[in-house]
Image (cartoon, rainbow, N blue to C red):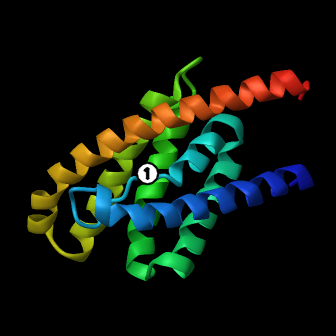
Amino acid sequence: MKIHTLAKLAILTAIALILGFLDSLLSGVVMPVPGMKLGLSNVAILYAVFFMSPVETAILMLLKVGLSMLLFSNPFGALYSLAGGVLSVAGMRLLRLIPKISPIPVSTVGGILHIIGQCLIGFVLFSIRPVLFYAPWLLICGTVTGVLLGILSDGVFKGLDLYNRRCGV
């Protein structure tokens, strides 16, 4: 792996962790469902989906999950994040194969798949009853946050593109 790529992964990991910390501060105030988060750190993952290789995207997701567990969570939280992250990244990478697709539908599907991955882990660990009760609320929130993060990411990507064109990068 090139030094440029390693530096980009380090920066994106730092961004994901900072956004994840902000997310943990906001989750109790903003989200209507207990334990639900906005998923702000997924802006960094979405950037990787659009501008980095599948392997680099997977590495970023694993770094984000592992370091977030050490800093903000616990092994159970990491298990939920890992299951959601794997399914989400796989689905977003597949959607990314559609030419000129916007970050908005990619992020939306990623949010939905993340919730499905977490529900699958919940089913394995607990049973189907609590998952069936909780899943519809999570899917609604995951869809809404996926759309909002897609809109945010679309704006960030356009701003970065404009900056790169002006600077001749």
Which quarter of the rendered picture does the C terminus lie within? top right
Observer-nearest of 50 and 169: 169
Residue 52 shown left or right of residue 88 in the figure: right
* Residue 142 point in image, percent of width and height: 31, 47
The answer to whether one can see residue 109 in this image is no
For residue 163, which quarter of the picture?
top right
Q: Is residue 38 left or right of residue 140?
A: right
Question: Badge 1, how many Cα within 10 Å: few under 14, some, many 20+?
Answer: many
Quadrant in the picture for residue 77:
bottom left
The residue drawn where x is 21% and y is 56% is 32
Q: Identify the residue position indicated by label 1 in the image.
A: 87
Say which amino acid is labelled 1: Leu
* Count of numbered labels shown in the rendering: 1
Residue drawn at (72%, 32%) of the image:
160
Identify the residue at image location x=35%, y=56%: 117
Q: Position of residue 111 (x, y in %)?
A: 38, 45
Seen from the viewer's position, the closer of residues 81 and 165 is 165
Relative to 60, 74 lies left or right:
left
In this rendering, position of residue 113 left or right of residue 92: left
Q: Residue 7, how many percent across, how many down?
A: 83, 56
Question: Can residue 149 be seen from the camera position used here?
Answer: yes
Which of the 4 image quarters holds residue 84? bottom left
Residue at 71% from the left image edge and 41% from the top image edge: 52
Quarter of the image with the N terminus is: bottom right
- In this rendered view, identify the residue nearer to me: 52 or 169: 169
